[in-house]
Image (tube, helix red, strand yellow):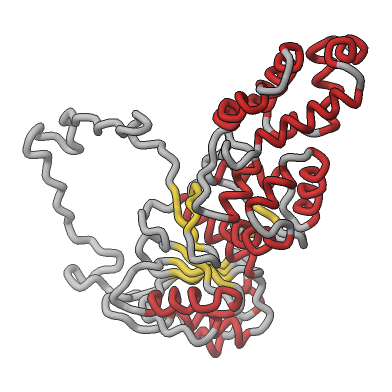
Amino acid sequence: MKNRLSIVFCATQSHAAAVRDLVNQYKKSKAPNYCVRVTANDGEIGEQFLREFQDNEKTIPTILTTSQKLSTGVDARNIRNIILMRPVNQIIEFKQIVGRGTRLFDGKEFFTIYDFVDAYQRFLDPEWDGEPQPEEPYAVCGEIPCVCEKQPLKPCPVCGQRPCICEKEPPEPCAVCGQSPCTCPKRVKIKLKDGKEREIQHMIATSFWNADGKPISAQEFLENLFGELPNFFKDEKELREIWSNPQTRKTLLEKLDEAGFGKEELKTLQKLINAEKSDLFDVLEYVFDSDFKPITREERATRAKATIFALLNDKQKEFIEFVLNKYIEAGISELDQEKLPILLQTKYQSLEDAMEILGDVQNISSLFIEFQKHLYDEKVA
């Protein structure tokens, strides 16, 4: 199907987005818009893709995914493939869809229908289908099938063999990953409504789901999250204040989960922006403001340590050092208020021993909450 214009008719707009993402994950073309979605919700960008698809001088985009929008009114004469991945209930609509491939074009002798829903069985129409056309005899020998003597392929001019058995030099390994072929994750830039671009890994086999339980693409998830974040905090300063307190952070994460942005989805987004070793704070801030550059949890802890330790005694420093190491290793969940008793038991074997070293419950709780304010201070990152 490479470089052959194709339209994929999907069940829903979300389905069209999922098929688009899947095609682009396994494409061999380097063009970012090899496969695009054109639906009613895609607005001007969808119309732009459609205009380019109908331009017979262009081959990108090569594949359009859609639901209802392109069953009529598409005048792309060089369409070679029609793919049906949704039910078709009316014979008129079926004929209109098939009609997308019947346009004449120089060098186009046929087009192919890939019917994954057996739509053809519902619309047997002899009057419309007509009688099968007999095969024409081959122009040279006049026979069916062709009986012309085929000339053998020429051997390699170097080794004299067919196929060639010459030893070929292996390609140079990638300068970044050291592999051949290169295994570096490919990345794509997504422009959000603030006019700025966010860079994400493109070749990642993953699916997101919206609050209604419908599958959406990574780009749609990112766009939705960007649109919702101002409902939870108005600026970076407020996000820092919320995130630096375990209780308000927990409330924010619960609200994000209710809106369709749960912890698992945010962790997947970490992978997409290559920030698996960063705090979820960095992920949210990067989506909110592309000028912010995520740092690793280790960098965050290292930068904040001097300020955190400034007013602590040696026993408190030892405990906070232990907590920070757990945070670097496992992430933000280690700083949840509910995790404090587990951390104390892991470090001191019992809560009683912990209280003997660090003071009463109130002092320990205060220590655990207060150090986090410095961890998310603006001076850190």
Query: In the rendered view, would you say 118 is above or below 209?
Result: below
Does 247 sit left or right of 159 as displayed? right
Query: In the rendered view, would you say 112 is above or below 326?
Result: below
Query: In the rendered view, would you say 344 is above or below 116?
Result: above
Q: How many marks?
A: 0
The spot of residue 275 in percent (x, y) is 55, 39
The spot of residue 255 in percent (x, y) is 80, 53
Can you tell which quarter of the image residue 327 is in? top right
The structure residue drawn at horizontal position 77% and vertical position 62%, both measured from the top left corner, is: 212
- Tell which of 110 and 55 is nearer to you: 55
- Image quadrant holding the C terminus, namely top right
Query: In the rendered view, would you say 198 is above or below 128?
Result: above
- Image quadrant holding the N terminus, namely bottom left
The structure residue drawn at horizontal position 52% and vertical position 48%, both measured from the top left corner, is: 292
Question: Looking at this rendering, what residue extends furthest in the bottom direction?
Answer: 127
The spot of residue 191 in percent (x, y) is 49, 62
The spot of residue 20 in percent (x, y) is 53, 61
Question: Looking at this rendering, what residue extends furthest in the left direction?
Answer: 157
- Tell which of 134 and 188 is nearer to you: 188
Question: Looking at this rendering, what residue extends furthest in the front direction?
Answer: 311
Can you tell which quarter of the image residue 156 is in? top left
- Tell which of 44 and 75 is nearer to you: 44
The structure residue drawn at horizontal position 63% and vertical position 84%, both measured from the top left corner, is: 91
In this rendering, does residue 113 appear at all? no
The structure residue drawn at horizontal position 50% and vertical position 87%, both measured from the top left corner, is: 73
Can you tell which quarter of the image residue 77 is in? bottom left
Does 130 sit left or right of 2 as displayed? right
In this rendering, does residue 140 appear at all? yes
